[in-house]
Image: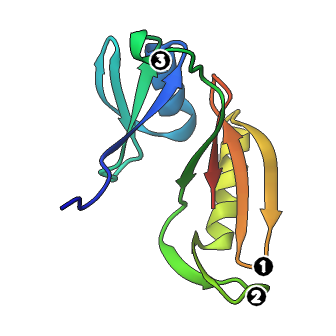
Amino acid sequence: MITGVVSVAILVSDAKKSAEWYHNKLGFEIVENNGHTVFVKPKGSLFLLHLCEKCDVWEMDRPGGRTGIWLHCGEVKMRKDSESGHLIPASNPDEVERTYHELVKNGVEFSEEITTTSWGKYAILKDLDDNEFEIS
C-alpha cells in the first residue's frame, strides 16, 4: 500500500545552479548533488524536490509554470473557508506573511503577491526557471 510521497521532480535548466538558488534563497538543504540527480529539501522535512536537468525522458516538457506544489510555513492546521464552509489545510496566516516578507528581502520573485482569502493567506513564488510554488 502507498503510504506517502518522498520526492517530486521539478524540471530545471541547470540542476547545480538551481540547487544553490533553493539553498541560498529558500534555505533548503542540498541532500544529494550528483550531476543529473540533485535533491533539495526544506530543513527538518523528509519531503524532497528532485531538481531534474534536461534529459531524454523530458521529451517535449520544459521548465516553468505552476507546479501545484504547496510549501507550508510552519505548522499546518485545517482552517474553515468562511465562504464555502469547507476545511482547507493551511499555515498560520501571520507566518505566511512573515515568510513572504523574508523571501522578498532575500530576493525571491513572486508572480502573485501575498493575498488574503476567506481561509488564510497565500503567495506564489518563482524559481530560476519560472517554476511556481504556493506558500500558504
Q: Which mark is residue 135?
A: none
What crowding class fits label 3: few (fewer than 14 Cα within 10 Å), some (14-19), or many (20 or more)?
A: few
| Residue 101: percent from left, percent from top | 72, 51
Secondary structure type for disc 2: loop
Looking at the image, do the residues carrying marks 2 and 3 touch, with CB atoms under 8 Å apart? no
Q: Nearer the viewer, mark 3 or mark 1?
A: 3
| Upstream in sequence: badge 2 or badge 3 | 3
**61 or 114: which is nearer to us?**
61
* 87 versus 21 height, above or below: below
- Tell me if label 2 and label 1 are in contact, CB under 8 Å: yes
Question: Which residue, given by chain and number where applicable, does mark 1 sit on?
Answer: 118
Hey, what amino acid is under mark 2?
Ser
In three-dimensional space, the C-alpha distance between marks 3 and 1, rounded to whole angstroms, equals: 38 Å
Q: CA distance from mark 2 to mark 1?
A: 5 Å
- What is the quadrant of residue 78 in the picture? bottom right
Callout 2 crowding tier (Cα within 10 Å): few <14, some 14–19, many ≥20: few
User: In which quarter of the view is residue 38 placed?
Assistant: top left
Decide: is 9 above or below 136.
Answer: above
> Residue visible at 45% across and 24% down?
19
User: Which label's residue is closer to the chain start, 3 or 1?
Assistant: 3
Q: Residue placed at 63% from the left, 23% from the top?
A: 128
Is 130 located above or below residue 120 in the figure? Answer: above
Q: Which residue is mark 2?
A: 82
Question: Taking 117 as reference, is 27 left or right?
Answer: left
Name the spot of residue 75 as percent of width and height, x first. 47, 71
Q: Which residue is mark 3?
A: 58
Q: Is residue 130 left or right of residue 74?
A: right
Q: Earlier in the sequence, mark 2 or mark 1?
A: 2
Residue 131 coordinates in the image, percent (x, y): 63, 32
Q: Position of residue 100 (x, y in %)?
A: 69, 52
Residue 110 position by quadrant: top right
Q: Quadrant of the C terminus?
A: bottom right
